[in-house]
Structure formats: structure tokens, C-alpha cells
Amino acid sequence: MENVYDVVIIGAGPAGLSAALYAGRAKMKALVLEGSKVGGQIAITSEVANYPGSIHDATGPTLTARMVEQADEFGAERVKDSAVSVDFTGNVKVITGEKGTYHGKSVIIATGATPRIIGCPGEVELTGKGVSYCATCDADFFQDLEVFVVGGGDTAVEEAIYLTKFARKVTIVHRRDELRAAKSIQEMAFNNPKIEFMWNSVITDIKGEGIVESAVFHNRVTGEDTEIFAHEDDGTFGIFVFVGYDPVSKVFKDCVDMDETGYIVTDPQMNTNVTGVFAAGDIRVKTLRQVITAAADGAIAAVEAEKYIVHSFKE
Amino acid sequence: MIALDKDTFQQEVLEAEGFVLVDFWSDGCEPCKALLPDIEALAEAYGDKVKFTKLNTTGARRLAISQKVLGLPTITLYKDGVKVAEVTKEEANKSSIEKMITDNAL
């Protein structure tokens, strides 16, 4: 068989790029399947302030660009392709992509997670028409307009703060009566005069002809439904959704062990239940999904993959 | 690809005959930048059937909203100045854009 990589890394977020860096530096022949874009979640994050050393110009895109450069420098190959199916049963693992088939002595799954949707009527139809999951992409459309941010975690509150640079008013819509975000982030939000809160509330319907014109807000305590319409002069408002993530693991179903929500189960060395197949980053069952834990996972997975190859592929 | 602005959009897109593809992007949109090489490749392949253009929405916000574009990336296909198809966000990838072109313009 020609062109067998030591490790095929599926995904090019912080976990995949960190694995690529460590694998490349260990002189492993490494390939990264980067899908349609590199960087993963942070590629669309406005600010990454909690990754050590990431202080100046600490946006997601700049951090991503530096990670890519570093992985490239150590010789990891990258290809714009996504895994469509995998066969992990053999000694050499086979990954079939949209553009080609790739063979690896080991595999690191680092496909991460993708933003979850609200799941209400109108949401899908009006995505890119006022409904957004990417503040850095779409914020400037809402210059001087009103914006609703759905969610109460770190991402929701941080992106709400970012959106105040553009929007006239930002209302955080949260299904509970208190935020889940870190206290320091909460404080910034509470002190921001442009941010208001709508507690115990969820959006149940989004309406509009071609663009968002109104939305129905359901109060979970009083049971009341309120439809809010865009101001006549505005014509529209924004709905930014940050209500958590779903794992991107469908391709690996029945190939490796997962929990009931689709996150991949590993041991502390990032081994899945299949020998030679590792998982790293947000795709794993873990308690803290952050850039730093993803990068750490990637490093461990690459080192363990190297050990595995040395043991299992003696020539 | 022709780089449009709010002054040339009317003439190059809305008053143009035939098919015009507009890539709506902005300075802050990383997915847009990642997609650009794919669109340039499609421009190579289909440039004789469709006029390929791009609009930086930073500084052309009102224009974008008038075209009901409030999210990026959005790739819109016009025929004789009328919007006939569009892909946005996660749907905006090379294969779906190519399908939009082959379904409508060939």
C-alpha cells in the first residue's frame, strides 16, 4: 500500500493543530484533514483571552493563524477534505473523504463540536437573515439595531458584550434566572449599559419575509408568550444563538465508543476503545471544553500515537 | 472576479443581463476568507456562463440588507437583476455553490 501516513488527524481546530504540531515535531508523517475551514470553534470567536500567552491581538482568527503556521513549520501536511466514512477494523486505518482516500497507521479524531440550534420554527429559514451563530461574521450588519442573544454561558455573554460595540441594545435571553458564565464575564455584562436581560425566557418562533421581523418569547415561569416586532425604522433585529454545542461524530458512529449524546469516550491517554484510534478536543467526553484543554488533548494524542506506532509497526 | 462597492452594485448586478454571482463577505468574516479560493476556482470553471463578483459588506451594510443579506458568507445568484438562488452560512460551500450554478445557469 502506498502513502500510508503515521497519523491521520481528522479536524483542524486547536486539538487537531496541536496534534499536528507534536506529530510533525516528532518526525511522524502526519496528515490533517481540515474540512472546509481551519480553526474550529475559535475561528469565529471574537476574543480568546484565557489561553496562556494569548494576550495581544488575542482574537480567534489570529490565534488560529499562528497555530496553522506552527503546524506547517514542523512539516504536517494539510488537505481540505472531510471524512465521509471510516474503516478502523484493519491494522492500517482507512479514511474516505469527499476528495480522496487516506491511510494511517494511527488516527486522531479531532472533529470537535458545532453550535446547537434553538430548534424553533423560522430559525433555519432565517439563518443569515437575522439569525446568526457567529458574532464576528455578522455583528456589523446590526450597527445601531437591536440584538437578542440567546444563552447564558461564557460564549453567549462574551459575544453579547462584543455585540454592544455595534448594536444599539443587546438583550440576553436566558432560560434560567441566573447566568452560567464565569463571574468576571457576568460582571462585565451587568456593568454594560447597553445590555439588558430577559430571564426565564426562550424563543419559540421566529418570523419574517426574507429577514427577521418578529419573534415570540415564552416566559417559562409565567407561561406568557410575547411577540416582539422590529421597530418600524429598523425593519429587522438580530438573534444570535449560543445555546451550547453538539459533537461532530456521526461519521464515527458504530466505529468507536460514544456516550449517549455522541461524544467519544477515551482514557486519559486519549485512547478510544479501538487500538490506534485516538480522540482529542471537544469531541471527547470531558468536563471543560476550552482551547487549552483541546490543545493539551492534541499533544497527548500525538505522543501516544507515536508510542503506539513504534510498538505495533516494527519492521 | 469583479470587486463591487455600493456605487457599482446597481449597474454590475441589478441592471446586468444574464447571470451574476455575488459573494457577500466582510473583513471580520473568517469563513468568508476560507471560502474565497473555492469561489475563485468556480469563477475559472464557469466564468463564461456567469459573471463572478464580490461585495465587501463592511461599508455597504444598507445595500446588503436591501438584498436581504444579514449573514455571512452568503453567495447569491442573480438573473437579469433578480435574485434566483442563494446559499448562506454552513450551506455556503464549494459543492452547494457549484450545484446552485449548474441547476440555474447551465
Image (cartoon, coloured by chain):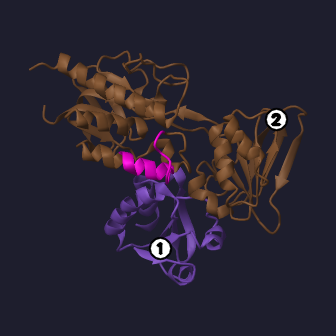
Q: Amino acid at mark 1?
A: Val
A140 relative position to A21: left or right? right
Q: Residue at x 26, y 33 (%)?
A: A23
From the viewer's side, name the closer residue of A4 and A124. Answer: A4
Specify whether residue A60 is in view.
yes
Pointer 1 chain = B
Residue matched to label 1 = B20
Image quadrant where one finds the C terminus of chain A: top left
Residue occupying the far left of the picture: A315
A223 relative position to A107: left or right? right
Graded by Cα atoms within 10 Å as few (under 14), some (14 to 19) or many (20 or more), the crowding at tag 2 reads: some
Distance Cα–Cα, label 2 vs label 1? 46 Å
Quarter of the image where one finds residue A19: top left
At which x and y percent is residue B41? 33, 63
**Dot label at residue B59:** none
Pointer 2 chain = A
**Dot label at residue A200:** 2
Nearest to viewer (mark 2 / mark 1): 2
Q: Residue at x 47, y 34 (%)?
A: A292
Q: Residue at x 56, y 51 (%)?
A: A46
Chain letter tied to purple: B
How many numbered discs, if any?
2
At which x and y percent is residue A26? 22, 32
Task: Give yes or no for residue A62 being in the magenta stretch.
Answer: yes
SS type, badge 2 = loop
Mark 2 on the same chain as mark 1: no
Query: Where are the magenta residues, as a range?
Result: A52-67
Quarter of the image where one finds residue A116: top right
Q: Residue at x 55, y 23 (%)?
A: A287
Q: Amino acid at mark 2?
A: Asn
At which x and y percent is residue B71? 59, 58
Residue A199 vertical position relative to residue A268 in the rendered view, above or below: below
